Every structure is written in structure tokens, then in C-alpha cells.
């Protein structure tokens, strides 16, 4: 980070512009952040039967998720061990008993073991376990599948669960929403022409809220003051007295979730789980963002709105509930794209500044630079 020693105390320097635009920096992030940390890749319930599969890019790798005959969800690098062909090119699907490479028909069980190949019986020296698919570490939490490509992954409890615990004052606090039991009511995918860090920084602050989020500020009036309530441990932003639900116009939403007590009712909580998850908690539903950084200037985001199973199964319209945060997303991502346009400008070569309401973003900047080490020098 750079900044003048003569800068007023109210202003703290951001990362230099190249951190948001340089391909080499992004390559270093792929290697040192996305491929070494836990990454949320799927709603586990969407892989609900043996043979269900999904593929997803994590850093520079493509990962294959497979539900086994034993009910266990496993993850592998999506690479045939023979000549390196990509096994599955579809993003989701279903296989019966095995996964077969379309190039030379090397065939793998749902547990990743090599089970067949042309002439394999004549090659007695080939260890089928050794030439199985390369495994990726997997965890299931909050109803989502998380993977880590590192040989030795960081502690899931300290990094992922720890981020939630730090925000809510204890990881057990999130149990009130019982997220794993909820059902997908709506998913919207956003293709944002902005660096992933610009998006994280935007989510971390509310200095912009009064300027671009009129609907959100109407529901959560304290956001008009410019301070991000999510960075006070255990604090949830209170609904306006006249607001009945977390909806685009303040109309009633749905019955609050069974575990949400009076202390958490009529409040909004936001959690950042670096590098790519945002969790938004309100009394009657949960909004779960997963970011997929594609390039230095492009990020794809899956946003899930989760409700109780009975509500979704009934076919009730959730549009007035979804619309509030959908507008917030659109407003935020438009702002992020506006920033991305100038990240390579000479005017931003040394970065910008953070006002006091944004000073906590420096913790994210330190987190990024600590993980990158000397790889961007």
C-alpha cells in the first residue's frame, strides 16, 4: 500500500490501482488465495442422488463434484489421468455408475477409482488406485459444499467458521437460521465487469448506501449514516419502525424462521467469509452470495435466496422478497463496474483513500497482501 505521510489522519490509502487490473496480480491471487483457501462451490442439496455431478472453476482448475453410491459427496480435479482430457464439460448432470473419458474411454467410479480402460487387464503393473482421479478436500457446512485445492488445507473451523463466529459473536449464533434446512427459492447469476476485491470492498462498507441504495436505507435507516453495521460484533441493523418485512417496499414478508428469537427478529446481519462468500441474514430468509473471480476485471456471482421448504413447495410468490436485494445487487455491481473502468488510470496508480467510515477495509487489504506475500513485487 502507498500513501503520503502528509495525508490527513481521516484518510487512509487503498491498495494501488494495479491490484485491481493487473493480470499478474490476478494470477498470483489464483495461486495463493483461490487455490489455497476454502471455496464455496455448490448448494449441496442440488447434488441429491448417486451420480449427480457438477463442475466449477476454482482458481486455474476445474473441479468435478460427484455424489457417490454411498451418498458421500466427493470432489476431484476434472482431468483424466491418461492424457489429461477434461472428463466432464457440462456444468451439471447425472451419470449412472461411472464417469468415462470420451477420448480413450478410461473409466472411473464415483469414488474416483480407475475401474476400466481399454487393455487395462493386460497391464498388471498399473495400480488402479494410484491412477484414480486426483482428490480435492471437501466440507459441507450451512448446506453448501466447500472445496480446497491445497495439499494441506487451512483449518475450516478457524477460517470459514471463524469468520462467522467473529461477526456474530460465536459460530453457534448462525444456527438460529438453520441454513442447511432451507430451500432455494430463487437464484440470480450476475456477470460483473469488476475485480473481485472491488466487490468485497463494496460489501464491507456502507458509506455509499445513502447515495445508491434508497430501498435498503428505507428498510434499514441506520445505513443512511454511512457506517457498516456488519462490522460491529453481534450487531444487526434494525428495521425501520414502520417497516413490516425485509421487502422492496417494506410490506410484510413471510413468517420468521423458527429459530430466530425476538433479539434477532426485525434485524439484518451481514457476514463476509473471504475470499468469496457473503451471507445476509434476515428474519424470514437468507441471501447467500458466491463469487467466482474469472479475470482481473470480471467476476461471476451466484446469489441464492433461501426459504423454508414448505414455503417454496407451496409455490408462493417470493418476488417481493427477492426484489429488495436484487436491486441492491444491481446498484452495487453497477458502482463496482464504474470503479473498474478507472483502475488502470494514472490518476489511480497509487490508489485512492478511505474515509473513517471505511477504515475497516484496511483489514481486508492486509489479508490480501499477507496471502500474496512477495508474489506481486
Image (cartoon, rainbow, N blue to C red):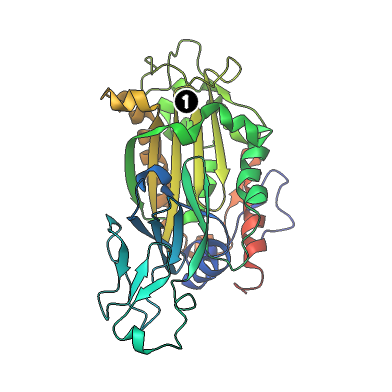
Label 1: state its secondary structure. Answer: helix
Q: In this view, does 50 lie to the left or right of 344?
A: left
Q: In which quarter of the image is the N terminus?
A: bottom right
For the point 29% across and 74% down, the residue is: 101
Camera-nearest residue between 292 and 82: 82
Camera-nearest residue between 155 and 36: 155
108 over 65 or under it: above or below:
below
Q: In which quarter of the image is the C terminus?
A: bottom right
Residue at the extreme top of the image, as rendered: 242
Q: How crowded is mark 1: few (under 14 residues within 10 Å), some or many (20 or more)?
A: some
Counting from the top left corner in percent of width and height, residue 143 is at: 47, 41
Q: Can residue 125 be seen in this view?
A: yes
Counting from the top left corner in percent of width and height, residue 43 is at: 41, 45
Counting from the top left corner in percent of width and height, residue 284 is at: 44, 22
Q: Is residue 12 left or right of residue 239?
A: right
Residue receiving disc 1: 217
Amino acid at each position: 500500500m502507498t500513501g503520503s505521510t502528509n495525508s490527513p489522519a481521516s484518510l487512509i490509502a487503498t491498495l494501488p490501482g494495479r491490484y485491481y487490473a493487473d493480470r499478474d496480480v490476478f494470477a498470483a491471487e489464483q495461486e495463493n488465495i483461490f487455490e489455497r483457501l476454502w471455496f464455496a462451490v455448490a448448494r449441496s442439496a442440488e447434488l441429491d442422488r448417486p451420480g449427480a455431478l457438477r463442475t466449477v472453476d476454482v482458481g486455474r482448475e476445474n473441479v468435478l463434484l460427484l455424489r457417490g453410491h454411498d451418498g458421500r459427496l466427493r470432489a476431484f480435479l476434472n482431468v483424466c489421468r491418461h492424457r489429461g482430457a477434461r472428463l466432464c464439460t457440462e456444468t451439471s448432470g447425472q451419470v449412472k455408475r461411472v464417469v468415462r473419458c470420451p477420448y480413450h474411454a478410461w473409466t472411473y467410479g464415483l469414488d474416483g477409482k480407475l475401474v476400466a480402460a481399454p487393455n487395462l487387464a493386460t497391464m498388471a503393473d498399473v495400480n488402479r488406485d494410484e491412477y484414480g482421479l486426483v482428490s480435492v478436500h471437501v466440507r459441507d457446512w450451512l448446506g453448501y459444499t466447500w472445496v480446497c485445492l491445497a495439499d494441506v488445507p487451512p483449518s475450516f473451523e478457524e477460517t470459514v467458521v471463524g469468520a462467522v463466529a467473529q461477526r456474530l459473536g460465536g459460530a453457534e449464533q448462525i444456527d438460529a437460521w438453520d441454513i442447511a434446512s432451507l430451500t432455494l427459492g430463487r437464484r440470480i447469476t450476475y456477470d460483473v465487469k469488476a475485480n473481485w476485491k472491488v466487490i468485497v470492498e463494496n460489501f464491507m462498507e456502507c458509506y455509499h448506501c445513502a447515495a445508491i441504495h434508497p430501498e435498503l436505507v428505507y428498510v434499514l435507516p441506520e445505513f443512511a449514516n454511512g457506517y457498516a453495521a456488519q462490522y460491529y460484533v453481534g450487531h444487526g441493523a434494525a428495521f425501520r419502525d414502520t417497516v413490516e418485512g425485509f421487502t422492496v417496499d417494506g410490506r410484510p414478508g413471510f413468517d420468521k424462521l423458527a429459530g430466530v428469537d425476538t433479539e434477532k427478529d426485525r434485524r439484518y446481519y451481514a457476514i463476509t467469509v473471504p475470499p468469496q462468500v457473503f451471507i445476509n441474514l434476515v428474519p424470514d430468509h437468507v441471501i447467500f452470495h458466491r463469487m467466482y473471480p474469472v479475470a482481473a476485471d470480471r467476476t461471476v456471482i451466484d446469489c441464492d435466496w433461501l426459504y423454508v421448504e414448505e414455503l417454496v413447495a407451496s409455490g408462493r410468490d417470493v418476488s417481493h422478497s427477492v426484489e429488495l436485494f436484487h436491486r441492491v445487487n444491481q446498484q452495487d455491481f453497477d458502482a463496482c463496474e464504474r470503479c473498474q473502468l478507472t483502475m488502470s488510470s494514472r490518476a489511480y496508480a497509487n490508489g485512492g483513500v478511505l474515509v473513517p467510515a471505511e477504515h475497516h477495509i484496511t483489514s481486508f487489504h492486509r489479508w490480501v497482501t499477507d496471502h500474496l506475500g512477495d508474489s506481486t513485487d
